[in-house]
Amino acid sequence: MEQIFFYIFAVIAVVTAIAVVSVRNPVHSALYLIVCFLQVAAIFILLRSPFLAAVQVFIYVGAVMVLFLFAVMVLDVGKESFSEHMHSQAIPAVITVAGLLAVAVWLISTGSLTAPLGPYTEEALSKNTEVIGKALYTQYIFPFEVVSLLLLIALIGAVVLVLKDKGRGAGRRP
Amino acid sequence: MTLNHYLILSFILFSIGVAGVLLRRNIIIVLMSLELIFNSVNISLAAFAYYLKSITGTVFVVFNITVAAAEVAIGLAILVAVYRTRKTVNVEELKDMRY
């Protein structure tokens, strides 16, 4: 049963991901990306991480994609006016992707992608959110603070970047 | 269901994202492809966390999502600033450091 659901989610995720990079209209791209993110959230649930699934839906589907759609519509870049076909980069790009896939297949087939088992048991991990919360506020408190500072910097940086022109104009007045 | 299933899915999504970054000229779609890459990495981290019975991968996904949100905010702010001065989102026309 789990396998069937995994394949459903995986196939939809891959198909929509291909659609994201291949359709011409950025708005359609963004909508396909939303579907892809929802499939990824479902895969997080298959991995017994409901907290991650909720965060994925809130932040990616809620915040990030709204930002993207907002940018697409504010900038009015609708359908691309410039011709966009497979251009001179196509062959190097295909070679790069094929090389990446070859490395991936080699890594997976040799089974070298592994690590020592962690300390948690199955039933401890079934209370996933509680375990994450405890780890986040004890073991990982320093990265947590750093990342919150990073978010603050990003917030201020975004505001400064967008308001730059107005700020300069106001500053010139003596 | 084994770890390899999730890793293969993650690698496929990663490759699609890299292909999008390399092939598309619209900077918005390049940013969306970057989000796809972030997501593929998140899948593999969560899969490792589940199959290795560890919490590190899960915590790292939370940090990863935070960094991705910050990246999108800054990226789209830069995009808006660039579009105001250059009136284009074509990556191939955005090749000068100063305007």
Image (cartoon, grey):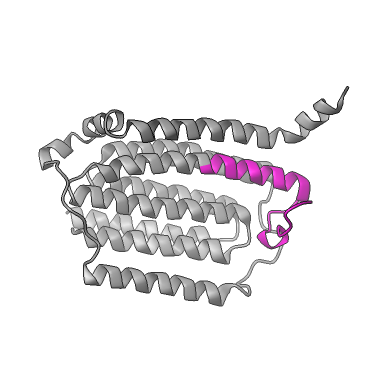
Q: Position of residue A85 (x, y in %)?
A: 63, 70
Is B84 part of what is drawn in magenta?
yes
Displayed quadrant of residue A146: top left
Counting every numbered tag in the picture gives 0
**Residue A61 spot, x, y in % from top left:** 44, 41
Q: Position of residue A127 (x, y in %)?
A: 18, 34
Tell me what residue is drawn at x 45 percent, y 54 percent: B36
Q: Is residue A7 visible?
A: no
Closer to us: B94 or A142: A142
Residue A145 drawn above or below residue B83: above
Q: Main secondary structure of the magenta part?
A: helix
Relative placement, left or right, of B75 versus A46 is right
Q: Residue at x 31, y 71 (%)?
A: A105
Residue drawn at the location 17% of the way across and 46% of the way down: A118
- Residue B17 magenta-highlighted: no
Please identify the quadrant where the N terminus of chain B is shown: bottom left
Rendered view: B50 above or below A54:
below
Residue found at the far front of this picture: A142
User: For residue A163, which quarter of the picture?
Assistant: top right
Q: Is residue B31 left or right of residue A118?
A: right
Q: Residue furthest top?
A: A174
The part of the chain drawn in magenta is B71-99
Q: Is residue A19 visible?
A: yes
